[in-house]
Image: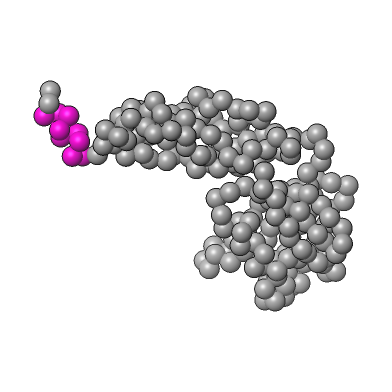
């Protein structure tokens, strides 16, 4: 899995007023938990661009004033109106301990339904996966090479490799929909 380095600075004061002052200074208040101690720190907002505003999943190498931690993003809070990043939670990775993470879906193959004129509709872009840090995949491969018109591929048909998929097995990942024009042609042929 891809890793990304983020440099942070420990926070002296915690609380609403100090967090607001940090945000005005283009910093994002963050917290790291899951390890021996909880670490409160702040990071320049610009460093989150390639971590949060991308469909890919990353492991983060956090450097907080010289101390390095391996972590994943557990949660990110955004302002409801202006979409500004308000707060980020990191979960520290520990050797041999399983973590839950949303992993993006990657389609493999060409669907015969799409070749026949159908449209591939993505229902799930990410799947919730549980694995140890070293077994976390970059993406979950979904084979659509036998997907016909009007059919869908479900989570249960995906073969996990050293990880467990926690998303409901009956949930559809992708469906090949039949366009209106093609429906008319199919009805006319009968």
What percent of the width, then of the height, locates residue 119?
32, 39
Q: Quadrant of the C terminus?
A: top left
What is the span of residues highlighted in magenta in the rendered image?
Answer: 180-188
Q: Residue 54: x percent and y percent?
A: 56, 54
Q: Name the chief secondary structure element in magenta.
A: helix
Q: Residue at x 32, y 35 (%)?
A: 114
Q: Is residue 121 magenta?
A: no
Left or right: residue 27 compared with residue 119? right
From what the image shows, is residue 100 above or below residue 41? above
Residue 104 vertical placement versus 143 (above, below): below
Query: Can you tell which quarter of the image residue 135 is in?
Result: top right
From the viewer's perspective, tell me whether residue 154 is left or right of residue 50.
left
**Residue 12 drawn at (x, y percent):** 85, 69
Residue 9 visible in the current orientation? yes
Q: Quadrant of residue 176?
A: top left
Horizontal relation, residue 65 to residue 106: left or right: right
């Amino acid at each position: 899995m891809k890793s990304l380095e983020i440099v942070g600075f420990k926070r002296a004061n915690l609380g609403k007023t100090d967090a607001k002052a940090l945000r005005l200074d283009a910093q994002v208040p963050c917290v790291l938990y899951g390890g021996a101690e909880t670490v409160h720190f702040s990071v320049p907002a610009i460093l989150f661009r390639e971590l949060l505003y991308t469909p890919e999943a990353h492991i983060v190498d956090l450097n907080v004033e010289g101390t390095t931690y391996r972590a994943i993003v557990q949660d990110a809070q955004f302002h409801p109106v202006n979409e500004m990043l308000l707060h980020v939670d990191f979960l520290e990775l520990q050797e041999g301990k399983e973590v839950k993470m949303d992993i993006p879906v990657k389609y493999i193959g060409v669907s015969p339904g799409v070749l026949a004129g159908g449209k591939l509709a993505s229902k799930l872009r990410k799947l919730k996966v549980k694995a140890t840090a070293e077994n976390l995949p970059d993406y979950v491969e979904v084979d659509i090479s036998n997907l016909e018109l009007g059919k869908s591929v479900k989570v249960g048909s995906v073969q996990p490799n050293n990880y467990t998929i926690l998303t409901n097995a009956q949930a559809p990942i992708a469906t090949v929909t039949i366009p209106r024009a093609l429906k008319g042609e199919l009805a006319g042929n009968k």
